Image (spheres, rainbow, N blue to C red):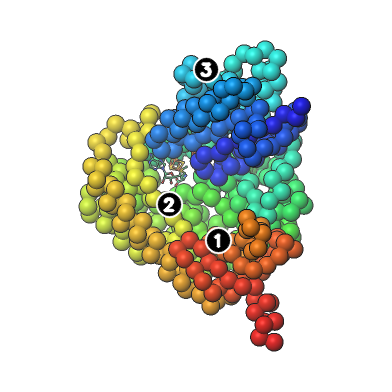
Amino acid sequence: MDQKIFIKTFGCQMNEYDSNRIYDAVKEIGYKKTKNYEDANCYVLNTCHIRDKAKEKVYHDIGRVKKFFRSKQKPLVIIAGCVAQAENQEMLKREPYIDMVIGPQSYHKINDMILNYQQKKKKEEETEFDAISKFEYFSKIKNQTGKISSFLTIQEGCDKFCHFCVVPFTRGPEYSRPFKQILDEAKFLADNGTKEITLLGQNVNAYNFENSKLSNLILEIEKISNIKRIRYTTSHPKDMTEDLIDLYKNSQKLMPLVHLPVQSGSDKILNLMNRKHTVDYYLKIFNKLKEINNNVEFSSDFIIGYPGEEKVDFMNTLNLIKEIKFINSYSFIFSPRPGTVAANLDLVEKKISVERLEKIQNQLYENQININRSMENKTINVLAENLTDDGTKVFGRSEYMTSVTFNGKKSDIGKILSVKINKYNRSSLFGELSVNINKKVA
Ligand code: SAM
Ligand code: SF4
Ligand code: F3S
């Protein structure tokens, strides 16, 4: 009988990358991917711990699986990711339906753990920080995502310890993968259909392997002819060095959307958060980039209602959003995380935080709609990624990551096409292939 594995992924792109690599790993021991958890005999939850209720979501999900399989053969249940790292043994104790708990830097052990469990039926937990072995293993098995736009993790962990954040505890210290290991993976992806690579790391621009930095890596990946677009996320303002900024001058493949989380527009709050940069410092980076290349746009992450945030701090954040005209950004109310410095601070009143979040999001939506409106009747470059679910249109992305749907055919997939935009909403653009428009005119 076929062994089928289902993975549900929460959280950031690094978890998505890891989930894909777990699929690559378990293939070696005979598992096939299934899209329906009802068919699975191995159920994996790749979890995120960044905001509250993460843990409860996991138990809730397991409850659902348990209910479905009540009168059927129980699947092997594995909890992976950042909740697994943070909660480890506790999870096995609290929910006996869970069979294995595996932290984000132990995935090189997943096959041995599964085989061992199948033989001995003994519950297992692995939460050691061992990024070296994880990526050595990942580099031996091929990255078979086969997608037009693929993720490639180059750096993991964080040494910055922002006072609100669990990542340094769930992903461990900063680690940069060897340069050649990354290039080999990029080449393999390119040989297998990938046209766009997004380099990933919790602090991707802190990448440093034997003095090779993110900028060196981007320049090398640019030489791979089949790769047409390069992105990277997530960056920290402190690591936005001149060499990286300079790439925006001439690079043909580095996309002009800079995702640079600022979190707050108030120096007082940035200081309380231990962000290690000021608003002025952030604006300097913004202005430098704009001077170098006026097409560059910024997106960001915001935390609203951080302990100590007063009206004036909030207004400074709102004004910064208006000034920079951030697009495609994320904003959340502060969520106290166990073990972090900010865990026990006095919270801003919930009602006030909710109102502030709404104001921030309205401003971000306005920025988004303005930029989408400015695309109307323009012809833009779109990387065609796949057919829409009903198969009648093509889905792709603009240089700024905005979804674009247009008429097209299967053979367009993987190409960068000129699309004339004729409709828009807040999150998406719609258009027609330029060649078709020309044909119609003729
Ligand atoms: N390394 C990136 C940086 O420094 O900006 C961020 C990575 S973190 C995984 C992604 C985002 O989650 C953060 O930028 C922050 O906005 C949000 N976040 C982290 N901890 C949070 C918390 N306790 N409450 C609300 N949002 C949080
Ligand atoms: Fe978290 Fe990013 Fe701060 Fe690191 S730099 S602690 S990942 S928010
Ligand atoms: Fe979540 Fe872990 Fe990513 S906490 S945001 S999955 S690094």
Tell me if residue 328 comes above or below residue 346 in the rendering: below
Residue 96 badge: 3
Q: Using the image, determine if residue 3 lies above or below residue 269.
A: above
Residue at point 37% right, 47% down? 332
Q: Please, is residue 270 above or below residue 61 in the view? A: below
Q: Is residue 440 visible?
A: yes
Q: Residues within 10 Å of mark 3 (few under 14, many from 20)?
A: few
Q: Quadrant of the C terminus?
A: bottom right
Q: In percent of the image, x 40 and y 61: which residue is there?
A: 365
Quick one: label 1 or label 3, which is nearer the N terminus?
3
Q: CA distance from mark 1 to mark 3?
A: 42 Å
Secondary structure at badge 3 equals loop
Rounded to the nearest angstrom, the CA distance separating label 2 from label 3 is 36 Å
Q: Quadrant of the N terminus?
A: top right
The answer to whether the residues at label 2 and label 1 have Cβ atoms under 8 Å apart is: no
- The residue under label 2 is which amino acid type? Tyr
Q: Secondary structure at mark 2?
A: strand
Q: Which residue is mark 2?
A: 330
Ligand 1 closer than 8 Å to label 2 CB: yes
The kind of residue tagged 3 is Pro
Residue shown at 68%/77% (left/top)?
435
Q: Give the vertical position of 101 relative to 335 (above or below).
A: above
Out of 62 and 250, give the one closest to the viewer.
62
Pointer 1 with pointer 3, Cβ within 8 A: no
According to the picture, the residue beneath numbered tag 1 turns out to be 403
Q: Left or right? Give the position of 80 relative to 184.
A: left
* Image coordinates for residue 266, horizontal then vertical, percent: 30, 52
